[in-house]
Image (spheres, rainbow, N blue to C red):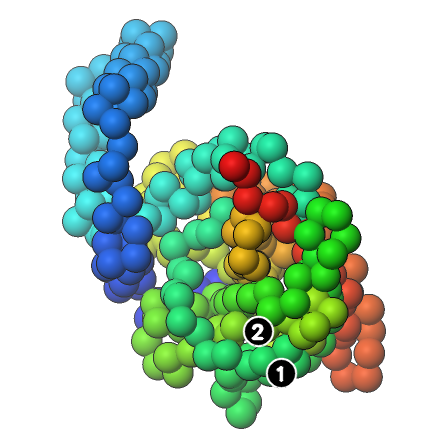
Amino acid sequence: MTAIPETATAAASGANATERFKSDKFAGVAGTPKERVSLLAREVLEAVHGTIRKHKVTYDEYNALKSWLIGVGEDGEWPLFLDVWVEHVVEEVATEHREGNKGAIEGPYYVPGAPEQGARGAVPMRDDEPGTPLVWTGRVTSTDGTALSGAKVELWHADADGFYSQFAPGIPEWNLRASFTADAEGRFEIHTVRPAPYQIPTDGSCGRLIAAAGWHAWRPAHLHVKVSAPGHELLTAQLYFPGDEHNDDDIASAVKPELVLDPRPSGDGETIEYGFVLDPERP
């Protein structure tokens, strides 16, 4: 397995993730009703209070937590912390009604506007990009089996060292990021490389929590996707590979059996067949 190189610092990737969140998603929080904010805030605080009382938390432990929370903000790691340890439950609740594909967390490293490659093409990558060549074919349909012509499949993933372009230095802007548009039959074909397992950044406050708790920091190898079509719910998912030792103890708790691929050897690489079923938008 390959760990994230030291040059991919938590502070640098955290700052990028924080700025990306502010520009892409922060505007939506203003519309939450006050009653809903009050309900959720009170219950979260009551859960914290209950933990303190149950475990007789000391002032030393409280001050350690306070110092750590300050550090998370200073390191720009709130997106990382929330996406790794909280988002999987939000995703589970938000999509429990779906009849189509299972989803998974988005994570902190999505970037909109990736280069369009049509129905069949390769993701942008360096001439010497390490990794096993991977050809992925699939079809996008609605829950009634109707092909979704023009469906958009956005793909992004880390490189063999655990780097994501635009969040680590020295990588071309759109490396291993692309968008594909399904043909008239809803089909697409993507050429990329198989990603490697990696550790989330451990040199910041999230890493200090991991070390203090005796946890590991590994994520299994995965492909990120967003799949969309007019009149259908957006699907955000991560796709995994069989046999990865961290499929069962992913630090982000995001692996689902339905999202594990079945790669087959082909020439000097692998092929996979995996399509998507989207749910119609609810009234």
* Residue at the (30%, 57%) spot, across then down: 24
Element at badge 1? Answer: strand
Classify residue 22 by image quadrant: bottom left
| Contact between labelled residues 2 and 1, with CB atoms less than 8 Å apart | yes
* Residue at the (36%, 41%) spot, across then down: 82
* Residue 11 shows up from this direction: no
Q: Nearer the viewer, residue 172 or 8?
A: 172
- The answer to whether residue 64 is left or right of residue 44 is left
The three-letter amino acid code for the residue at tag 2 is Phe
Give the residue at mark 2. 180
What whole-number distance in Å separates the C-alpha atoms at marks 1 and 2?
8 Å
Give the residue at mark 1. 121
* Residue at the (17%, 39%) spot, across then down: 70
Q: Nearer the viewer, residue 25 or 52?
A: 25
Where residue 222 appears, x then y in whole percent?
59, 59
**Crowd rating for badge 1 (residues with CA inside 10 Å; few <14, some 14–19, many 20+):** some
